[in-house]
Image (cartoon, rainbow, N blue to C red):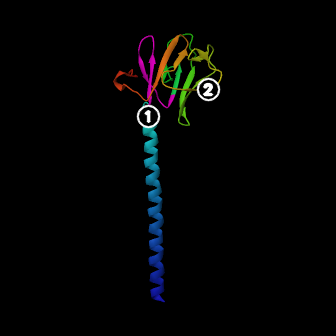
Amino acid sequence: MDSIYHVARFCATVALYAVLAGALWILWTDIRSAQKIVLLTSQPAGELVELASNQIYPLMPICSVGRASTNVITIDDPAVSLQHALITRRDLAWWLEDLNSRNGTYLNDHRLETAAVITSGDIISVGHTQFQINIGSTTRSQFPQTT
C-alpha cells in the first residue's frame, strides 16, 4: 500500500512539473512573438518625401498626418486639418484615408472619398504639401529628428 502511495505521489509531481513546463513554454513563445510585433511596428517600412523641400519622413505602419503635434508627420499649413489623413498597413497592403478633413486628401490628384490602397511612387497631397511615397526604401540618417 505504501508503494502505491509513492508511485501516485511521483506521478502527481511529474504531472505538476509537466503543466508548469507547458505554461512556461507558452509564456516564452508569447513573449517572443510580442517582441517581433513590436520590432515590426517600430521600424520604418519606407519613407514619405516632401516634394517641395525633399524632406524625408519615416513611413511607420500607422502614420498620421496633420497640423497637430501629436501626428507622426506634422505639417504647419493652415489648409491642413489637425488630424488630416492616416496611412496604415493592413492586409499586406498600404492604405491612405482622409480623416474627414476640411480640404480633403488627394492621391495622384484625385480626391479621396474612401480609403485607397497606395503603392510606391504615388503622390499624396495634404493642404499645400505633396509627398511621394516610397515603400520598402529607407534612408534613416535623413529622417528629421523629433524633439
Identify the residue at image location x=46%, y=54%: 27
Q: Say whether residue 143 is left or right of residue 66.
A: left
Q: Amino acid at mark 1?
A: Ser
* x then y, percent, for residue 46: 44, 27
Q: Residue furthest bottom?
A: 1
Q: Residue furthest right?
A: 113
Kind of element beneath mark 2:
loop
Q: Which residue occupies the foreground of this view, 53 or 13?
A: 53
Kind of element beneath mark 1:
helix
* x then y, percent, for residue 78: 55, 10
Check the image and report above or below for 7 versus 52: below
- Disc 1 target residue: 42
Check the image and report above or below for 123 versus 39: above
The dot on residue 60 is: none
Q: Residues within 10 Å of mark 1 (few under 14, many from 20)?
A: few
Q: Which residue occupies the foreground of this view, 57 or 136?
A: 136
Q: Amino acid at mark 2?
A: Ala
Asked if the stretch drawn in magenta spans residue 54, the answer is yes
Asked if the stretch drawn in magenta spans residue 64, the answer is no
* x then y, percent, for residue 129: 51, 12
Mark 2 and mark 1: span between their CA atoms?
23 Å
- Disc 2 target residue: 115
Magenta-drawn segment: 45-62
User: In the figure, residue 136 lies in which quadrant?
Assistant: top left
Check the image and report above or below for 126 versus 41: above
Identify the residue at image location x=53%, y=36%: 92
Residue 118 appears in view: yes
Name the N-terminal-most of marks 2 and 1: 1
Q: Does the residue at mark 2 contact the one at mark 1 (Cβ under 8 Å)?
A: no
